[in-house]
């Protein structure tokens, strides 16, 4: 019996977002089908992967992670260069030091660091604040100005601080990460609010607040699947590519942090931890992630190799 | 393929008696056509109608069982493409291979390693499910001996991987009573293989070179009278397996009968890291069984965890009991944290309180298992409820101070809570990961 291949007739596609400036651009999104179903529709851009850089030396990262960045952890410029060497498509600069509990770095100083990093590498940047909404609005405003015209991706904008960040992105030609706490309705609402300020939909990237494998990954997984189906069936306010800020989640889990001696029944720590990051990314790629922020260079390498395979045609 | 609601309706008693839980026979017929109800829910349907509706009333993916006893593995009965549509029913079985080229002792050691792949997550044990014996030797006697050795050393059901019916027969003579999965039938051997499966009433893999050949072969096997089947489309490269798995599930839900069975996938990637990534795709995307060559806990733990996550019922928030939890050995001076009883929220807070190395009490308020912000938005995480818990849980007898830490995301609750409870309210960090640094700066009794 001949099998008639079942294809969905989707009516819309995910918006394509372009990051950076020629000749160093990275395009994400644009899919007209579910992830990697090349037999049914287009996936014009492969999922892109960024490595994370902090503007201050991290504490509490396990040795197997810090050893990959030995000697550069207190120098964001050198660290960013290292990420590019490791093959990152983008660098994600997280301005952790701006947090009042850390150094409470001023927006101006943050902008200087961002500028220095931007000038040192030729890949596009993702620039994240410290997670304190009010402070992030101030910081990202200055960062947007200092890097005017570079078409980077700034975040995270929330219900509380999106106005300032959206305005800064519009004036200075950047893209925005719209962040919502694992809630598809809030996600959509924030996209509407941002587009109502006249930032076009193809300059928004959705952050659904992903968790790590074993820590609620299924919530973000289903929100991402629903977002993709919403996009493909014509909901323009869900038709933005999704960013998965997963490195920060993975590397605080017990599974990534416990040493081989502490948890021998879980196997070798390095292998386990890297797989924890890779498998978290693989699952989110199946759910519809377009941009991945990771930490371990080996996890990046393995995930990219996986994407190479998934991007091959499976047309019948 | 499937029947329309109207076609089903014609066969029903049309009495609208509501015994099926639907308001009318027509409503029931529509639900059945959508795969959301089964014919057995109508107690009044005639035998003739059952016959006529047989195909439509069977679940879209047949229920198939492998093995016997406590570790019997049940697969199938799946009804959706996406977990958010309802839920995925039966978690993918994880099989780990054993080669029959190994000696008896080596096999025992390998099986022992497989038996140890049991992990505790949130108080529940999760493990692999099957031991897959491979006829790499090409020798029937060796295969049978390996199957016997594996069987003797494990409680898990076996998958017997050989396309040689003579080897299969030899192995079944020794372990057939335990209903292993025969793996399996191809276009070349299906008659002999199906006869063996029928004789031992054991489930069997049907392998096609592609989807078309698979559909043809399934029909031939079904015509021979065997229906405990598992499908293998022959694809081994991850991008092609994804396409085939998607097709098989979609076609099954459209009631294309040859594909109405659970599937099996084989992870053959030579690169051990990439192999785990391939397996993760199969767990996300519909595989009934994933056959792995690795028995390394570092590889298996992430996969078992992923399976647990993907197969969680999205309609049932997982909640912890609303009571006082003690982290470390807290005393009268220890901090008191308020959170919600959504298990994920609770475990994050518990983990971070642990990380702070300061013993403390956690009071998860009953929000029907939803998170802090959602609970607050839904009116289930209120100052009244928190005050009530502070009063009734007995925490006031355990601590000498009257300070309570609430999640930063619901800082707005603090005034009202202070007023209602009389406790001093400290607004904690938004994310539980901020607890250790919060404590350092703000906690002193
Ligand atoms: S139980 Fe049967 S007869 Fe009664 S309403 Fe339902 S479908 Fe109709």
Image (spheres, rainbow, N blue to C red):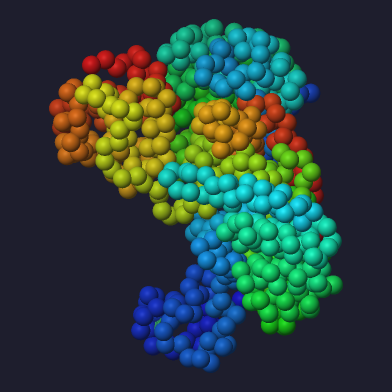
Residue at the location (31% across, 45% down)? B321
Residue A264: image x %, image y %? 57, 34
Give the vertical position of A177 relative to B136 (above or below).
above
Residue B361: image x %, image y %? 28, 30
Residue B420: image x %, image y %? 15, 32
Numbered label tally: 0
Q: Is residue A196 left or right of residue B282?
A: left
Residue at the location (71% across, 38% down)? B273
Residue A218: image x %, image y %? 52, 45
Residue at the location (62% across, 38% down)? B298
Q: Is residue A161 visible?
A: yes
Quadrant, the N terminus of chain A:
bottom right
Residue B23 position by quadrant: bottom left
Quadrant, the C terminus of chain A:
bottom right
Give the vertical position of B346 relative to B188 (above or below).
above
Compare residues A168 and B279 and report the one nearer the observer. Answer: B279
Q: Is residue B132 left or right of residue A258?
A: right
Compare residues A29 and B245 and report the one nearer the observer. Answer: B245
Compare residues B57 and A7 and report the one nearer the observer. Answer: B57
Quarter holding ligand 1: bottom left
Residue A120 position by quadrant: top right
């Amino acid at each position: 019996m001949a099998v008639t291949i079942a294809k969905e007739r989707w009516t819309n596609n995910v918006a394509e977002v372009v990051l950076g400036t020629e000749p160093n651009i990275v395009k994400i999104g644009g899919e007209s089908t579910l992830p990697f179903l090349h037999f049914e529709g287009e996936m014009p851009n492969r999922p892109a992967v960024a490595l994370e850089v902090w503007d201050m030396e991290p504490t509490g990262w396990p040795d197997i992670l810090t050893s990959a960045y030995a000697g550069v952890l207190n120098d964001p410029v050198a660290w960013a260069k290292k990420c590019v060497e490791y093959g990152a498509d983008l660098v994600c600069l997280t301005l952790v030091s701006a947090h009042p509990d850390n150094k409470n770095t001023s927006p101006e100083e943050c902008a200087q660091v961002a500028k220095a990093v931007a000038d040192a590498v030729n890949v596009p940047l993702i620039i994240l604040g410290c997670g304190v909404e009010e402070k992030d609005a101030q910081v990202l405003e200055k960062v947007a100005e200092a890097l005017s015209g570079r078409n980077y991706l700034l975040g995270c904008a929330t219900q509380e601080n999106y106005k300032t960040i959206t305005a800064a992105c519009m004036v200075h030609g950047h893209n925005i990460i719209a962040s919502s706490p694992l809630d598809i309705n809030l996600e959509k609402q924030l996209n509407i609010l941002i587009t109502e300020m006249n930032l076009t939909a193809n300059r928004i990237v959705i952050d659904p607040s992903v968790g790590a494998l074993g820590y609620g990954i299924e919530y973000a997984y289903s929100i991402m699947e629903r977002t993709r189906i919403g996009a493909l069936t014509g909901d323009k306010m869900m038709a933005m590519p999704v960013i998965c800020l997963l490195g920060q989640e993975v590397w605080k889990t017990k599974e990534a942090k416990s040493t081989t001696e502490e948890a021998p029944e879980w196997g070798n720590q390095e292998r386990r931890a890297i797989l924890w990051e890779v498998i978290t990314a693989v699952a989110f790629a199946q759910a519809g992630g377009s941009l991945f922020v990771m930490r371990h260079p080996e996890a990046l390498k393995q995930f990219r190799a996986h994407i190479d395979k998934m991007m091959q045609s499976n047309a019948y | 393929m499937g029947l329309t609601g109207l076609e089903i309706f014609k066969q029903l008693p049309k009495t609208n008696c509501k015994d099926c839980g639907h308001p009318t026979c027509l409503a029931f017929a529509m639900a059945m056509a959508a795969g959301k109800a089964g014919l057995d829910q109508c107690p009044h349907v005639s035998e003739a109608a059952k016959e006529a509706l047989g195909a439509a009333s069977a679940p879209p993916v047949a229920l198939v069982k492998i093995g016997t006893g406590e570790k019997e593995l049940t697969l199938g009965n799946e009804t959706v493409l996406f977990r958010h549509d309802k839920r995925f029913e039966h978690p993918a079985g994880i099989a780990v291979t054993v080669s029959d080229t190994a000696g008896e002792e080596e096999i025992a050691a390998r099986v022992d390693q497989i038996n140890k792949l049991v992990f505790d997550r949130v108080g529940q044990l999760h493990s692999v499910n099957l031991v897959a014996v491979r006829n790499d030797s090409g020798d029937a006697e060796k295969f049978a001996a390996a199957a016997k050795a594996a069987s003797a050393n494990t409680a898990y059901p076996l998958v017997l991987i050989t396309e040689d019916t003579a080897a299969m027969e030899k192995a079944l003579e020794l372990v057939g009573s335990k209903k292993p999965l025969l793996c399996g039938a191809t276009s070349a051997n299906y008659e002999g293989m199906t006869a063996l499966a029928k004789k031992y009433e054991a489930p069997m893999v049907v392998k096609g070179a592609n989807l078309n050949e698979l559909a043809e072969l399934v029909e031939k096997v079904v015509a021979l009278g065997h229906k405990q089947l598992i499908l293998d489309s022959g694809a081994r490269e991850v991008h092609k397996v994804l396409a085939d798995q998607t097709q098989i599930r979609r076609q099954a839900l459209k009631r294309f009968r040859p594909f109405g069975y659970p599937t099996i996938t084989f992870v053959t990637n030579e690169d051990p890291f990439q192999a785990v990534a391939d397996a993760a795709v199969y767990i996300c995307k519909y595989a009934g069984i994933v056959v792995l060559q690795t028995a390394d806990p570092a590889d298996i733990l992430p996969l078992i965890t992923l399976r647990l996550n993907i197969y969680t019922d999205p309609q049932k928030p997982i909640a912890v009991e609303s009571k006082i939890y003690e982290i470390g050995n807290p005393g009268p001076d220890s901090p008191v944290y308020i959170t919600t009883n959504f298990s994920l929220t609770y475990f994050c807070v518990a983990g971070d309180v642990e990380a702070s190395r300061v013993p403390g009490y956690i009071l998860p308020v009953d929000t029907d298992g939803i998170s802090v912000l959602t609970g607050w938005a839904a009116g289930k995480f209120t100052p009244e409820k928190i005050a009530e818990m502070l009063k009734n849980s007995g925490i006031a007898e355990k601590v000498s101070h009257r300070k309570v830490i609430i999640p930063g995301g619901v800082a707005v609750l603090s005034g009202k809570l202070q007023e209602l409870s009389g406790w001093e309210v400290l607004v904690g960090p938004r994310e539980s990961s901020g607890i250790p640094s919060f404590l350092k700066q703000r906690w002193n009794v």
